[in-house]
Image (tube, rainbow, N blue to C red):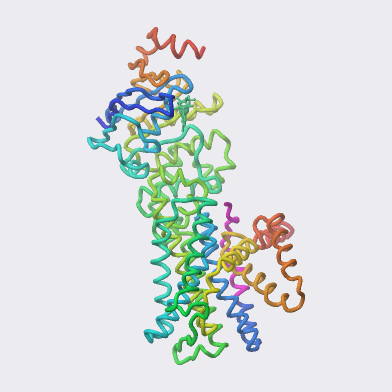
Amino acid sequence: MNAVQYDKKLRLQLFIILCCSAIFVNIFGDYFTRFLLSEIIILSLFAMSLDFLAGRGGMISLGHAMFLGIGAYSTAILFINFNIDPFLCSLLAVVIGLIIGYLIGFIIVKTDGIFFIMITLALGEMFHSWAYTNDFLGGSDGISGILRPKLLGMDLNEPLFFSYYLLILLILVYAFLAAVTDSPLGRNLDAIRQNSGRVLSLGGSVKLYKSASFGISAAIASLAGSLYAQLNGFVSPEISHWTVSGEGLIMIIVGGIGSLSGAILGAVVVHIIQHEFSKLVDWWMLLMGGGFILVVLFLKEGLWGLILKFKNYIIENK
Amino acid sequence: MIISLQNISKSFGANNVLKNISIAIDKKECVGIIGPNGAGKSTLFKIISGSLFQDGGSIIFNDANIDKLSIEKRSRLGISQSFQSNSLFNEMTVKENIMVACSQSFKVGWELFKSLDKRTNIITKSYEIAEEVGLTEYLDFRSDNLSYGLQRQLEVGLAIANNPSLLLLDEPTAGMSNEETKNIVKMVKKLSTYYTTIIVEHDMDVIYSLAKKIYVLDSGDLIFDGTPNEVKNSKLVQERYIGIKQ
Ligand SMILES: Nc1ncnc2c1ncn2[C@@H]1O[C@H](COP(=O)(O)OP(=O)(O)OP(=O)(O)O)[C@@H](O)[C@H]1O
Ligand SMILES: [Mg+2]
């Protein structure tokens, strides 16, 4: 598992461009574009959680949609059954995701490569079928009636405000992950991805570092799940289906694994193709599949790599 | 005495790679281990550092039995090794390689916020280590862009970044040119004045110039131990090892 080249400045530039576009869309958009924007931001959070896990620690999780589910269901239950403030629900969902993620991580990070992928897949599917059959979680119907927070006198049930709220959270998560990437933990995760045996022989707690990063990633996915439940007003087991994890992985591969802002770009591109093209043409799956194969074959560092090449080209030809 | 190996044995299937090896080493000693290919030298290192466990016998380090300790725990106690084949962080620069290594001994490896390359204490220490292993000019080179000889130097650099109280060097000159060998011998000679060092080496000149005491392994048996002069004059060693080499 290789991660893309490290270019902090470009990472930030790309992120700022994406945020500005989001603000633009939000101001001039209508109800539907705002909803689409909200979906994309939430998926970006999910993609960033996968990007952090794969790009830093070299862990590919095909069960991460489980944490979307954990975040969404805990938000639903805390709100509906315990009447907790929606904002607090999201915060609690982060904490729950962190704890469950850390504990699961602690058990599974011993495994590597394909075994890790299969274990995460199995766990995700276990969660999905459990949610599907559990009466308390509403079975296949899920839970509805989830409301969005009211913050600083603003009712986030108004789409314009909710998109801004999501954008602020995206900025916070981005800033957090960018800081963690450069921190000792982040650099140790890079080291583990490159040569975990050497980190051990230097006295590093590979297991602790990896499970901590699994917990962090799960917490962010759980936040995304909580927000997704609030966006739609309901949650159903579909949110934790393994194909959702698969789509997340496609996003980060298209964006460029380990580039953080590339993950967001990947979410934008993949979701728009999925959503908009599926309305226009019925062979959109072919388009998506073909595009994905081209990226994997020719763009090892995804769209991020393309942007990086473009930047270097401009610098050289100045 | 810093470490004592007591009747260490190890086999892989029917292959008895180490048979009843006992070695005791004093603080600040520099000890050499020699022996033909496949004698069990690297296996012995792996057993000391904890990446393999022995089948029989025990290891006492600083008066404590460390038989059950994992590799990272032993490393934290101060047992550090450089490997026979380079084991670096290839996508990182020399500086980053050393800083990651230092982040373990500074116990900050799990910290989430303040950037690693803004931590002055670790940077200072990393520069010292780069200096020690002659890589000051190459700090910003990616380690996979270094020449093989310089990578060997970084390999030793990572081992000392860990603040070792026992340094295990597995053929630091393996595969190096004569010129590169000279550099690294000078470097190791200096290091062996502050660290208790065990060095495995095929180059006899190197071993004679570094080690005060030499152990000779052959097919898993400890067949001789003595000062460089005693080894030079030992008929047995001449026959079993050095004779074969020449
Ligand atoms: N993991 C392993 N599984 C099976 N056999 C092994 C393993 N590691 C080493 N051996 C065998 O143990 C014997 C000793 O190997 P070792 O690497 O310790 O030798 P060495 O003295 O370091 O040799 P060299 O000078 O070539 O480095 C060899 O016969 C080798 O094939
Ligand atoms: Mg060897």
Q: Is residue B51 above or below residue A128?
A: above
Residue B159: percent from left, percent from top: 41, 39
Count of numbered circles in the view: 0
Residue B236: percent from left, percent from top: 39, 9
Q: Nearer the viewer, residue B109 or A159?
A: A159
Quadrant the C terminus of chain A occupies: bottom right
Residue A66: percent from left, percent from top: 49, 68
In the rendered structure, the answer to whether residue A236 lies left or right of residue A199 reads right
In the rendered structure, the answer to whether residue A124 lies left or right of residue A303 reads left
Q: Is residue B89 above or below residue B231?
A: below
In the rendered structure, the answer to whether residue A183 lies left or right of residue B92 reads left
Q: Nearer the viewer, residue B165 or A282?
A: A282
Q: Is residue A175 visible?
A: no
Magenta span main SS: helix
Span of residues in magenta: A1-19
Snapshot quadrant of residue B2: top left
Q: Is residue B8 visible?
A: yes
Magenta stretch encompasses residue B187: no
Q: Is residue A284 above or below residue B12?
A: below
Q: Nearer the viewer, residue A275 or A47?
A: A275
Q: Is residue B62 above or below residue A244?
A: above
Residue A179: percent from left, percent from top: 47, 64
| Residue that protrudes farthest toward the top in the picture | B235
At x 44%, y 12%, the residue is: B240
Magenta stretch encompasses residue A8: yes
